[in-house]
Image (cartoon, rainbow, N blue to C red):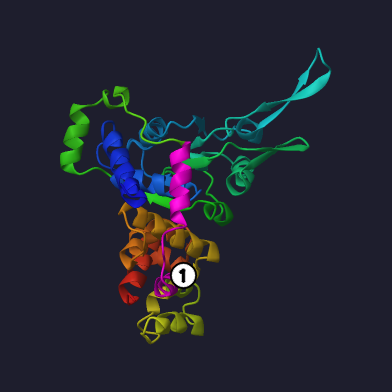
Amino acid sequence: MSDFIWCKDIVEKCRNETAKRVVGQTNVVDGILTALICDGHVLLEGVPGLAKTLIVKTFADISGLSFKRIQFTPDLLPADVTGTLIYEQQSQSFSVRKGPVFTNILLADEINRAPAKVQSALLEAMAEKQVTIGEKTYPLPNPFFVLATQNPIEQEGTYNLPEAELDRFLLKIHVKYPTAKEEMSIVKTAGLAALTAVNTVFSAADFNKFKGLLDSVHVEDKIVSYIVSIISVTRQSTSDQTQAAFSRSGQNFGKQKLDFLKYISFGVSPRGGIALFKCAKVQALFAGRDYVITEDVKAVAQSVLRHRIVLSYEATADGITADDLIKKILALMPVP
């Protein structure tokens, strides 16, 4: 069996094992696995009761990695996340008590319920894979992976994540309602899903193998240009850069055709382009291929870009979402 077929087989096993506890939500499982391979983090957004926590716990079980959960609340302190120094009376010295952030998979449940000071405690951990306690810096376990959840409809007692923190998340995945058929299965097995045993599918060594294979996935320059064009279009609705982005793909639209870009106040940073590039390569691995096609880019575009686009007031007034704009850009951008 080739390494790329092995990748496809592992992904299928992940889906099958997760399906023992979770009905549907295959896109969520794929997104979590994608982020882990890319050394990224995931923000899961969905209303209560959609099994977000169960999905994360199940993924931890099938991965064989260590797992901890933090329930974010308004009275949480940064030390409750990272850890703190404890004074030992007998030795008359301070010792380090490491917080729950020292794990492989960290579930930050309802992350938007904690104030900015607590949210910022995760920034160093997410970006640098390390934590500073007192005067010393401690490396986090490898791999280190944050899965954060938030409720999109409840505003009371919540603190919106700043754009700089949102950009730390590789993917923002919308957890959707199940279909009628899926919900029938959920209702009939209520209370039993969490008790169902699952098998460990992969290990830390397998993750390292995945990451090694990621470098072997070929991306042609025309695909890279396609990715850069998508990113560039989000930045300036009236600039020459926007027209140039479409021109690179063989199109030149007038301002009227691009009028929808007025709904974007700030576009995607280069970090977003890098994320789209990496996630497209993972999609190729999932399909058992060693090369990227445009469908791989489209498959991950919304999850990669939706939280990196800052909408204008007009977009809010007209009920336009980031997903709407991404769909429009993908529809207009010719494939290479």
Reply above or below: 321 against 193. Answer: below
Residue occupying image coordinates x 42% and y 82%: 248
Reply above or below: 192 against 30. Answer: above
Specify whether residue 180 is in view: yes
User: Which residue is outermost to the front?
Assistant: 1
Left or right of 90, for residue 235: left
Residue occupying image coordinates x 17% and y 42%: 180
Left or right of 318, for residue 275: right
User: Which residue is outermost to the top?
Assistant: 90
Specify whether residue 156 is in view: no
Q: Position of residue 184 (x, y in %)?
A: 16, 35
Give the total number of marks visible in the rendering.
1
Q: Identify residue type, mark 1.
A: Ile
Tell me where residue 121 sits by quadrant. top right
* Membership of 165 in magenta stretch: no
Q: Which residue is mark 1?
A: 231
Reply above or below: 160 against 203. Answer: below
